[in-house]
Amino acid sequence: PEQSSVLPPEMVLWLKAKYTSHAFVELRNCGAVTSADDFNDVIKGVVAKSPKYFAEHFWRATFYLLLWGRAKHLQPFFLKELKRRLPDGTVLDGPSLRPRSDYMVEM
């Protein structure tokens, strides 16, 4: 299956339509960016790394950050569910999530 299959249909629609204003709002809502300045820093980082293919890389970065933000939001719920399903006394170190800066390097 495609990675987009884990996203709600309305989210897939704006990603495919490539609405940049919607990208900002969604990244802000999921905590992947904290402000307009942070969003602009992401854009500047993408431009600096690949000015020739900016649009393609911007949307890839948006998708990565969207998944990262959603994972960060869901992390405590996932931990709670893991603890519920695992036998008592099981020690967990995680789940862990790579820092956002790791994803910024890959873009």
Image: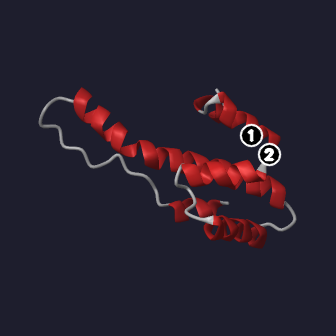
Q: Quadrant of residue 39?
A: bottom right
Give the residue at x 31% y 40%. Answer: 79
Tag 2: residue type? Lys
Between 40 and 60, the one lying in front of the other is 40
Tag 1: residue type? Trp
Q: How many marks?
A: 2
101 sits to left or right of 60 = left
The location of residue 15, given as percent across then percent down, is 74, 41
Q: Characterize the local packing of mark 2: few (<14), some (14-19) or many (20 or more) Cα atoms within 10 angstroms.
A: some
Q: Quadrant of the N terminus?
A: top right
Q: Are marks 1 and 2 in contact (CB under 8 Å)?
A: yes
User: Can you tell which mark lies on residue 14?
Assistant: 1
Between 47 and 12, the one lying in front of the other is 12
**Residue 64 seen from this side:** no
Q: Characterize the local packing of mark 1: few (<14), some (14-19) or many (20 or more) Cα atoms within 10 angstroms.
A: some
Q: CA distance from mark 1 to mark 2?
A: 6 Å
The location of residue 92, given as percent across then percent down, is 24, 44
Q: Quadrant of the C terminus?
A: bottom right
Give the residue at x 24% y 30%. Answer: 84
| Mark 1 residue element | helix
**Looking at this rendering, what residue extends furthest in the right direction?**
52
The location of residue 31, given as percent across then percent down, is 52, 54
47 sits to left or right of 11 = right
Q: Is residue 63 above or below residue 101?
A: above
The location of residue 60, given as percent across then percent down, is 71, 51
**Residue 42 seen from this side:** yes
